[in-house]
Image (spheres, rainbow, N blue to C red):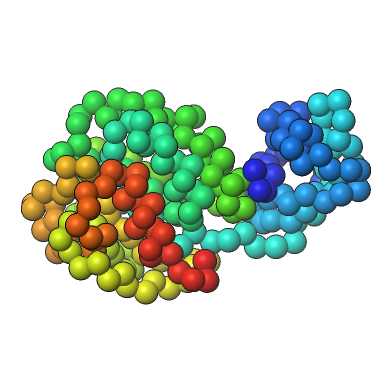
Amino acid sequence: MNRILFAAGECDAEHRLVLRDRRAAHILNVLRPAVGATLRVGQIDGAIGVGHVEQACGGEVRLRIELNGAAPEPWIDLLLALPRPKVLGRLWAQLAAIGVGRIILVNAARVERYYFDTHWIEPGVYTPLLIEGLEQSGATRRPEVWIRRGFKPCIEDELDPVYAGAPRLLAHPGAPTEAPALPPPAAGAVRPLLAVGPEGGWTEYECGQLGRRGFRRLSLGPRTLRTDTACLALLGRLMPSKF
């Protein structure tokens, strides 16, 4: 937990934040600050700053919040064929930490139908994991999540209005391995979109549909990787130096 995050409604009118949950336990048992110390804090989906420790004992932490900086902006979006439930569970926090701004989970020919029955796509389950990833990375902006059970309607009807003019990349075995330079993140800018298929790969039909909508193929080389490994490796390769 490299930044203590809180919701806007948790602070009182005097900008004080009282914690008695896992955040307090982390502060008391791991950080162990003295009264008067400052901690890195951030408002979820908002600004970052410092929390001045006014009390830290008895299972309770009281901070006076001072927000004075802009949080790091997400720099890329991910179109991901819905992976196996356990894999998805591992990915939520990692995707938030690495700076994904929108996660579009979409059906594909090689996605098992029962994947859409998993509890891992319920907001009450994945939202705490997204926040955990933000706490790790020091960011505050939660990824937006789309769940799309239809591949064709999503690709044909929804992407162009949102990603007009944005770089679009398609992960596919056998494609060139050279990664294009992506622009650094900027508030309000249309982010690049990376498409990663199921572990069985995109079908030729799906590749064709994506290709006709401006997706440029990219690969990590000859090795066949699991979805979570491939996602993080691709994102690490594409990450701008000024992220």
The image quadrant where one finds the N terminus is top right
Which quarter of the picture shows residue 62?
Answer: top right
| Viewer-nearest residue: 223 or 44 | 223
Which quarter of the picture shows residue 13?
Answer: top right
Q: Residue at x 70, y 39 (%)?
A: 9
User: Would residue 144 be visible to someone looking at this image?
Assistant: no
Q: Residue at x 66, y 48 (%)?
A: 2
Q: Position of residue 177 (x, y in %)?
A: 25, 67
Vertical arrangement, residue 106 with respect to residue 85, above or below: below
Q: Position of residue 166 (x, y in %)?
A: 33, 68
| Viewer-nearest residue: 59 or 75 | 59
Vertical arrangement, residue 169 with respect to residue 106, above or below: below
Which quarter of the picture shows residue 195?
Answer: bottom left
In the image: residue 172, left or right of residue 47: left
Q: Position of residue 206 (x, y in %)?
A: 13, 51
Q: Residue at x 39, y 30 (%)?
A: 120
| Viewer-nearest residue: 153 or 197 | 197
In the image: residue 240, left or right of residue 178: right
Instruction: Spot the residue most to the left.
Output: 204
Label total for image: 0
Q: Residue at x 67, y 56 (%)?
A: 47
| Viewer-nearest residue: 154 or 63 | 63
Instruction: Spot the residue most to the front.
Output: 223
User: Would residue 27 be visible to someone looking at this image?
Assistant: yes
